[in-house]
Amino acid sequence: MELEFWLLDVSYDIVGGVPEVQLWGLDRSGNRVLVVDRSFRPYFYVLPVGDPEEVARALRQALTAYV
C-alpha cells in the first residue's frame, strides 16, 4: 500500500516486546495519519579503539550475557 503524507513527528516505542517506529503526519486531505513499522531493528554504531577483532570479541561476549 502506498501512502503520501506530510511527516510531522517520529516516535519509537517497544510494544509487546517488539520495537516499532511510529510516523505521525497529515495526508493531502488534512486527515491524521499514523504509520507503524514493526520491522525496524534497533542498532548502534561503534568506533572501536584498539584492535577491531578484540573489540568484536568483547562485544559478542557482552551481548551473549543479555540473551
Image (cartoon, rainbow, N blue to C red):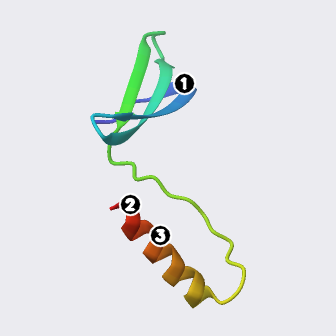
Query: Which residue has dot 1 on it?
Result: 6
**Where the C terminus falls, by quadrant?**
bottom left
Expressed as whole percent of the image width and height from the top left, the position of residue 39 reads 33, 48
Expressed as whole percent of the image width and height from the top left, the position of residue 66 reads 38, 60
- The crowd level at tag 2 (other Cα within 10 Å; few <14, some 14-19, many 20+) is few
- The crowd level at tag 1 (other Cα within 10 Å; few <14, some 14-19, many 20+) is some
Q: Residue at x 56, y 59 (%)?
A: 44
Give the residue type at disc 1.
Trp
Query: Which residue has dot 3 on it?
Result: 62
Q: Residue at x 44, y 29 (%)?
A: 4
- The image quarter in which residue 38 lies: top left
Q: Residue at x 40, y 23 (%)?
A: 34
Distance Cα–Cα, label 3 vs label 2? 7 Å
Q: Nearer the viewer, residue 63 or 45?
A: 63
| 43 versus 34 height, above or below | below
- Looking at the image, residue 23 sits to the left or right of residue 44; the answer is left
| 58 versus 1 height, above or below | below
Q: Are marks 3 and 2 in contact (CB under 8 Å)?
A: yes
- The label on residue 66 is 2
Give the residue type at disc 2.
Tyr
Distance Cα–Cα, label 1 vs label 2? 39 Å
Dot placed on the residue nearer the N-terminal end, 3 or 1: 1
Give the residue type at disc 3.
Ala
Element at label 3: helix
Q: Are marks 3 and 1 in contact (CB under 8 Å)?
A: no
